Image (tube, grey):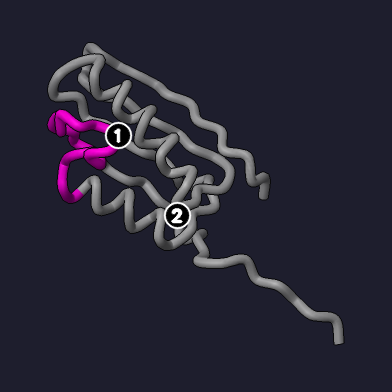
Amino acid sequence: MNSKLSIVVRVDLDHSKAQVIAKGHITIHSVNALYVVAKRANSLKGGLDLELDISSAWVDEEALEMLRSAARARHLPAIIDPEQAPCTISVLADRRHHSAPAFRHAA
């Protein structure tokens, strides 16, 4: 898995939908890049339904919980969006996530 984070945004203003697709490795540090992109997409139109598709990414457990927490709160973290604009987020995640890299020792 490539650790470089790649983000693509698809926007359908007619149907008030946006999809942020991330691939690569999402950590507690790189998750802020997703938040910034989500904030920009959310600012395009009020009432936009925003889907964060991280199903093809390798997501650390803590980062996944951060994303889910933002979805439950319907706001992005205050450090990213101090005005706390309403943000309808859904997180599309796969089961592929981990909390720390596994290292194997040679016997």
Prevailing secondary structure of the magenta residues:
loop
Q: Residue at x 18, y 33 (%)?
A: 87
Q: Which residues are magenta?
A: 72-89
Q: Amino acid at mark 1?
A: Ile
Q: Which mark is residue 94?
A: 2
Above or below, 88 against 61 in this view is above
> Residue 93 colored magenta?
no
Distance of label 1 from label 2 (alpha carbons): 25 Å
Q: Tell me where residue 41 appears, x and y as whole percent.
A: 31, 22
Of 55 and 103, which appears nearest the observer? Answer: 103
Residue at horizontal 48 percent and vertical 43 percent from the top: 30
Which residue in the protein does label 1 denote?
Answer: 80
Q: Which residue is more in the foreground, 93 or 26?
A: 26
The picture places residue 48, in percent across and down from the top left corner, at: 20, 24
Badge nearest the viewer, 1 or 2: 1
Estimate the x, y position of residue 106 in percent, counting from the top left.
85, 81
Q: Secondary structure at mark 1?
A: loop
What's the residue type where badge 2 is placed? Asp
Q: Position of residue 98 (x, y in %)?
A: 52, 64
Instruction: Answer with left or right where residue 21 lies relative to residue 102.
Output: left
Residue at 22% across, 12% down = 14
